[in-house]
């Protein structure tokens, strides 16, 4: 008789629980740490190295002195433990640089406001407070540098008037965006050239609000790192987007300018750019112009990371299927609409790891300003060591500085992972 | 199978004359002359590389032609961006690979273009979108993302997305080619329904059953030229040119 190939299942096989070695703690250990001989050896070696590092570090850090007057005193007490007293003595300097002590509340308040201002940007649920994020840059500049309240507000007043003028033109009188934009730009320029100064003078007489002026060279410590880092991050992002789009443009001139800019900036070390900012720029500018050193550094750092940002975003753009462009074009969306609504949201989403990478890199690169003798935390470490009392102290300062940077960078990294999870739409 | 022909009017929807296109040195479309009247349903077929997709992509300027003229709804396609955007907003297109916007929900995919291009208020755009999603029979998927839908569902959303712009002409570019066999029917049914409502349609497809059932005219292309065109009955029963015969024997032969 031939073998029968026909078969009909009579009974369903119900699902059963997996074997005990595949689930729970034991399963996890087996799968992740001891899945093979090589894996087991690596696990044991890693644990060994972690233990020997912590074996020395924990007693050193935990038993550290916090209240001695100098390094000498620490060493006399116990040379084998940390001397954190330098932090106790100099923490204010590490945070605020040479900022006048009686004005410490200003950078502190600026920092608190910074935390509030980024909330609406990071979490869409609080987007209704976005107005504060817009006010914040002006507020921060005024708090940090001081001077008349009105000379900062006038910038906002001028820009608001310009924007209102533009909108009115579009709504009421003109259909052409280009002409309206040019008119609005011209009228804003007129406002800043001829009207703003007398107006500020007048407002200062009527309602004088001002803070004592603090010059840029007094800025230092983490205040400086944050000023340069946050401004750089916020400004380099949109510039990077425009550069990335420009690099893909069909218009050869725009493409050439963008490629040239990106390749030039990426090909030059940041330190070189910072030297240009601190020394050379003054030769090129007309004599007598006083171009703030912090502003110069911020511009250089911004341009530097914008070039990197552009390449990261270009990677995201290249990752998008051509079909997305075609679909949005076939629906009649204009170039800018399709960039804004279809292309950029997806390209930026793909580029999140790279973008945050660039942000973190920028933030840490702010320590390079110590080379051009600005007093960021790393620069201050040398200054502190120049003090006879703390001469020879390294570890404690750098551990503290490293920890501060780590907190900010780790925060950014965590946020980016949260964002990636949130924007995941394919499951 | 009774076909409704009452919809075809004398009004010219698309007029293509002596149109030529090259990709570099490759002469992909050669002296194309085609007139499509409003309400007409045309199926374009032909071997791969014959230029049929390129032809319909020229109609909404996803590809630029280099010679001859294309007039859509009385507007000639030139380099004028305003004309191009206007034509694109009136000509819907559905693609082989759906090309839905993966970062937006089904509903947002459908409301986006009406809200930004036609400046329809959100409430109204949502109503239109739901109406169209009901038409393609997936209103219950409105709040899902494209990645969560099956291929057939995605393609129907893509059709709904185009319909939301209230287009006067629809272009279908091999819309069933990327689908699993069991999903082809649901997409074809949607297209048949659309055809019965009198939409002007140009479909590039290998679905000859569909061509028989709904087309008013079948166009056969090979080597960038229109080789033969006829009513479906005649086209399938009495193909004139050898190339058409060969093609038909290859796709109907098994």
Image (tube, coloured by chain):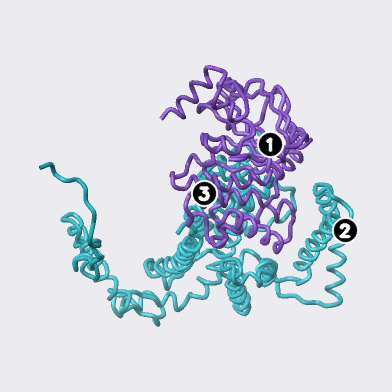
Chain colours: A cyan, B purple
Q: Are marks 1 and 2 on the same chain?
A: no
- Mark 1: secondary structure: loop
Q: Is residue A134 above or below residue A286?
A: below
How far separated are the C-alphas under marks 1 and 2? 65 Å
How far separated are the C-alphas under marks 2 and 3? 68 Å
Q: Which mark is residue A194?
A: 2
Left or right relative to A9: residue B137: right
Q: Which residue was labeled with disc 1?
A: B40
Instruction: Give the foreground label among 2 and 3.
Output: 3
- Mark 2: secondary structure: helix
- Label 2 CA crowd tier, 10 Å (few <14, some 14–19, many 20+): few
A196 or A385: nearer the viewer: A196
Q: Measuring 29% from the left and 74% from the top, which residue is drawn there? A: A58
Q: Measuring 46% from the left and 29% from the top, which residue is drawn there? A: B251
Q: Are marks 2 and 3 on the same chain?
A: no
Quick check: can you spot residue A272?
no
Left or right relative to A414: residue B60: right
State which quarter of the image contains the C terminus of chain B. top left
- Mark 3: secondary structure: helix
Q: Position of residue B103 (x, y in %)?
A: 55, 56
- Rendered image quadrant of residue B4: top right
Q: Position of residue B43 (x, y in %)?
A: 60, 33
First in sequence: mark 1 or mark 3? 1
- Rendered image quadrant of residue A256: top right
Q: Measuring 40% from the left and 82% from the top, which residue is drawn there? A: A67
Q: Is residue A316 above or below residue A151?
A: above
A332 or A317: nearer the viewer: A332
Q: Position of residue A11 (x, y in %)?
A: 23, 62
Extreme-left residue of the structure: A1
Q: Which residue was labeled with disc 3?
A: B186
Extreme-bottom residue of the structure: A67
State which quarter of the image contains the N terminus of chain B. top right
């Amino acid at each position: 008789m031939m073998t029968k190939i026909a078969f009909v299942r009579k009974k369903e096989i119900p699902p059963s629980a997996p074997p005990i070695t595949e689930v729970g703690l034991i399963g996890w250990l087996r799968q992740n740490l001891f899945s093979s001989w090589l894996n087991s050896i690596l696990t044991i070696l890693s644990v060994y190295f972690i233990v020997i590092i912590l074996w020395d570090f924990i007693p050193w850090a935990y038993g550290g002195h916090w209240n001695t007057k100098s390094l000498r005193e620490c060493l006399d007490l116990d040379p084998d433990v940390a001397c954190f007293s330098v932090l106790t003595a100099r923490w204010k300097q590490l945070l605020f640089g040479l900022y006048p002590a009686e004005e410490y509340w200003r950078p502190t308040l600026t920092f608190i406001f910074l935390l509030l201002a980024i909330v609406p940007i990071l979490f869409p649920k609080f987007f209704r407070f976005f107005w504060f994020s817009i006010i914040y840059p002006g507020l921060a500049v005024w708090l940090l540098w001081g001077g008349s309240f009105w000379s900062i507000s006038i910038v906002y007043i001028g820009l608001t008037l310009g924007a209102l003028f533009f909108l009115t033109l579009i709504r009421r009188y003109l259909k052409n965006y280009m002409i309206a934009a040019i008119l609005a730009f011209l009228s804003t320029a007129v406002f800043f050239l001829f009207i703003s100064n007398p107006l500020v003078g007048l407002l200062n007489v009527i309602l004088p609000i001002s803070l004592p002026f603090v010059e840029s060279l007094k800025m230092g410590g983490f205040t400086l790192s944050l000023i340069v880092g946050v401004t750089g991050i916020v400004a380099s992002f949109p510039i990077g987007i425009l550069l990335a789009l420009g690099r893909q443009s069909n218009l050869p001139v725009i493409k050439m300018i963008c490629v040239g800019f990106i390749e030039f900036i990426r090909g030059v070390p940041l330190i070189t750019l910072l030297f240009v900012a601190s020394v050379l720029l003054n030769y090129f500018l007309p004599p007598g112009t006083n171009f703030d050193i912090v502003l110069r550094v911020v511009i250089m750092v911004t341009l530097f990371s914008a070039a990197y940002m552009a390449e990261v975003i270009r990677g995201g753009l290249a990752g998008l299927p051509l079909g997305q462009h075609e679909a949005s074009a076939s629906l009649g969306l204009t170039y800018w609409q399709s960039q804004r609504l279809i292309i950029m949201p997806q390209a930026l989403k793909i580029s999140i790891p790279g973008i945050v990478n660039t942000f973190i890199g920028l933030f840490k690169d702010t320590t390079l300003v110590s080379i051009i003798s600005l007093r960021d935390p790393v620069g201050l470490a040398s200054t502190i060591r120049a003090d006879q009392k703390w001469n020879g102290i390294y570890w404690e300062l750098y551990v503290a500085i490293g920890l501060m940077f780590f907190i900010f960078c780790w925060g950014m990294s965590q946020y980016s992972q949260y964002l990636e999870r949130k924007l995941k739409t394919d499951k | 199978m009774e076909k409704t022909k009452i919809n075809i009017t004398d009004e010219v929807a698309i007029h293509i004359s002596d149109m030529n296109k090259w990709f570099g040195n490759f002469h992909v479309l050669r002296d194309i002359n085609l007139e499509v009247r409003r309400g007409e349903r045309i199926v374009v077929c032909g071997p791969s590389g014959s230029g049929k997709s390129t032809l319909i992509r020229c109609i909404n300027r996803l590809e630029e032609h280099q010679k001859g003229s294309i007039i859509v709804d009385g507007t000639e396609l030139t380099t004028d961006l305003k004309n191009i955007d206007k034509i694109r907003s009136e000509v819907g297109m559905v693609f082989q690979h759906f090309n839905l916007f993966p970062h937006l929900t089904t509903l947002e995919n459908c409301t986006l273009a009406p809200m930004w291009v036609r400046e329809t208020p959100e409430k109204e755009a949502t109503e239109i979108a739901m109406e169209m999603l009901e038409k393609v029979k997936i209103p219950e998927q409105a709040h899902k993302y494209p990645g969560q839908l099956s291929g057939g569902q995605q393609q129907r959303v893509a059709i709904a997305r185009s319909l939301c712009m209230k287009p006067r002409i629809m272009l279908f570019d091999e819309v069933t080619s990327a689908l699993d066999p069991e999903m082809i029917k649901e997409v074809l049914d949607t297209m048949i329904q659309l055809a019965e409502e009198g939409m002007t349609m140009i479909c590039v497809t290998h679905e000859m059953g569909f061509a028989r059932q709904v087309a008013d005219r079948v166009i056969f292309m090979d080597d960038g030229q229109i080789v033969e065109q006829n009513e479906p009955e005649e086209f399938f029963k009495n193909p004139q040119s050898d190339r058409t015969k060969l093609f038909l024997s290859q796709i109907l032969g098994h």
